[in-house]
Amino acid sequence: MITQQFAARFAADWIDAWNAHDLERILAHYTANFEMASPVIAQLMDEPSGMLKGKDAIRAYWAKALARHPAPMFELLHVLVGAESVTLVYRGHRGMSAEVFWFDAHGKVARAAAHYAGS
């Protein structure tokens, strides 16, 4: 089970890493073969499924995203805790957003899905 304390620490570091545009620090939260789903993947990476797998593929995607938005971009609004997942609700350059993170037994993100209220 994920604790509120774990979720709060994860959320703070994840938001700080994105706002610092520190790609390696961002990727440190994830397993080597994690899966990422986002409608933005379809737009930026020409991947109709909206899904990527593995740090190399997702590193390229996030590097493009960070290059497009050089100013700090995320304001954490809520941290929601599930049994094996955490959902962060935040305001970013796309407006209201939520991201769900599923964790492995070592506390690393194995799968994530981003959701946006608007484009």
Image: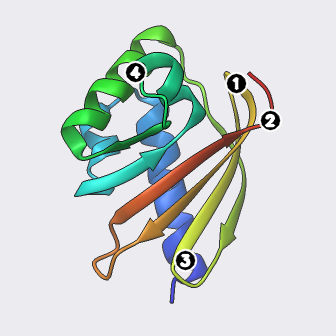
Q: CA distance from mark 3 to mark 2?
A: 27 Å
Q: Nearer the viewer, residue 108 or 6?
A: 108
Residue 3 place in picture, x, y as percent: 55, 83
> In the rendered image, which quarter is residue 56 located in?
top left
Q: Nearer the viewer, residue 11 or 36?
A: 36
Q: CA distance from mark 3 to mark 4?
A: 35 Å
Residue 31 sits above or below residue 41 on the image: below
Residue 2 place in picture, x, y as percent: 52, 83
Q: Hey, what amino acid is under mark 4?
A: Met
Q: CA distance from mark 1 to mark 4?
A: 17 Å
Q: Secondary structure at mark 4?
A: helix
Q: Residue at x 59, y 25 (%)?
A: 73
Q: Hey, what amino acid is under mark 3?
A: Gln
Q: CA distance from mark 1 to mark 3?
A: 28 Å
Q: CA distance from mark 2 to mark 1?
A: 8 Å
Q: Secondary structure at mark 3?
A: helix
Specify whether 55 is left or right of 2. Answer: left
